[in-house]
Image (cartoon, rainbow, N blue to C red):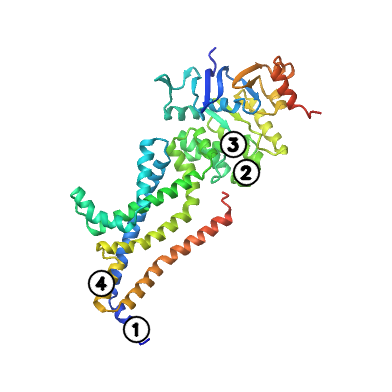
Amino acid sequence: MSGILRLDGLRKSFGSNEVLRGIDLTVQQGERIAILGASGSGKSTLLRCINFMEVPSAGTVTVAGTPVGEEARGGRCYRPAELARLRTRIGMIFQQFNLFPHMTALQNVAEGPLSVLGVGRAEAEARARQHLAKVGLAEKAEAYPARLSGGQQQRVAIARALAMEPEMLLFDEPTSALDPELVGEVLETILGLSREGRTMLLVTHELGFAFHFATRVIFLHEGMIHEEGTPEQVLKHPRQDRTRAFIGRHSTFAF
Amino acid sequence: MEYEFAFGEILRDWDLLARGIRLTAALWVIAFVTALAAGLFLGIARMSPRRALNWPATAYIEIFRNTPVLVQLVWFYYAFPVLTGVQVSPFVAASLGLCLNTSAYCAEIYRAGLQSIVAGQWEAGRALGMSEATLMRRIILPQALRRMLPAFTNRAVELAKMTSIASVITVHELMHEARTMATQSFLPLETFTVVAAIYFILIYPGTLGALLLERRLATRGGAA
């Protein structure tokens, strides 16, 4: 099985700092993968290489059997139009939500279908209303982002990604910028999506959530996959010392 | 002081002044509209990581910002024809000079405005699969233009005043007409006072508009 997404020997450097040092990963349709690791372990960079928010320094990304970019002059070369088309198939949810502040919630969600997919306005807005309803914000359609709580903004951002009807979703620490009492509503929304059998990759610090959400957990250390397995294996019975230490640090105050 | 004011005599030549005002306004509008358009492309080129775009744009902007407008206009009227063999009318030379000069300043306003939009907005647009042009048109410019508005209004006011320099290359705009009238009537005091008043009446609404705009944007705090 080639999977819906395959990474081969993925590397990324920023100047002399090598953040990813050869990642191999195959993701099957419907898998939910939680990516864990200390800050600086490269987990966000890994996620951002999948939709080319960062262009990998080496290695290949293969989506639904087709390698992205073409071999040229000892590296890979990516055409902007190809990357734009790829991104319409991969939804991304950011830590800071990044809603468009000059648009209402409805306009935010309708914008992608409208200006990228070329869907008509009536159709795009009807679909946007459905997606807003799905994240429980039907009544906030006309509100501007500044009038929404962080949790609501993040749910609108999820609806915005869903409106493109993507083949997979990438979550980059979706609850890290939220007040603790707002984390729950966003996690509930994400769990709701997992019941639809969507393919999702999630970078998070919420180990408890990763346990309930994921079908597979990946622990990154120094830009490499240090340990991976089911949530049960990795979070409850880690084999590697570093994984154990990381999980220990994150549950210091568990009660 | 024993001076007898003769404003009546100046205002009797209203036709001449009116023609001057028309040309001043035409210069101002033509130069500003074209500079707004050219400045956008220059500003984007200046931000480009590609050296072939960025370097010429930077050179252009710095040359026009760091030489006097007077020299630029005179150069376009007297030197440009020698270089190219194309003789341009004073009005065209003045429009061209003022447009090029103002476009350099506009480019910097665009650049500062575009760069003030946080990285997350560019990323959110790209992540949806937007092309750079769509991203600019739908996401970045609508937000940035709001922040640029006060700076552009100031630029428009500056340009309105700069049009008076065109008199040097014999464009029959307001200042040029004033000089003609002053020498013919021997009434420089009245003539230039009237002309100053006309400039003030033409330009002050712009300054006022800029001030109001700035206040309104400040109280809104940039939200929505």
Instruction: Say whether disc 3 or disc 2 marks the residue closer to the N-terminus.
Output: 2
Q: Residue at x 30, y 56 (%)?
A: B71
Q: Nearer the viewer, residue A16 or A1?
A: A16
Under mark 1, the amino acid is: Phe
Task: Name the residue that disc number 2 marks.
Answer: A140
Observer-side mark, 2 or 4, equals 4
Disc 3 packing (10 Å; few <14; some 14–19; many ≥20):
many
Is residue A76 left or right of B123 when viewed as pictured? left
Task: Name the residue that disc number 4 marks.
Answer: B180
- Residue A98: quadrant of the picture: top right
- The image's mark for residue A157 is 3
The image shows residue A252, relative to residue A115, as above or below, that is above
Under mark 2, the amino acid is: Lys
The image shows residue A227, relative to residue B214, as above or below, that is above
> Helix or strand or loop: what does disc 2 sit on?
helix
Q: Residue at x 59, y 28 (%)?
A: A44
Task: Name the residue that disc number 1 marks.
Answer: B5
x, y percentage for residue B157? 41, 61
Is there any visible trace of residue A248 in the rendered image?
Answer: yes
- Which chain is mark 3 on? A
Disc 4 packing (10 Å; few <14; some 14–19; many ≥20):
some
- Which chain is mark 4 on? B
Is residue A133 left or right of B158 when viewed as pictured? right
Q: Are marks 3 and 1 in contact (CB under 8 Å)?
A: no
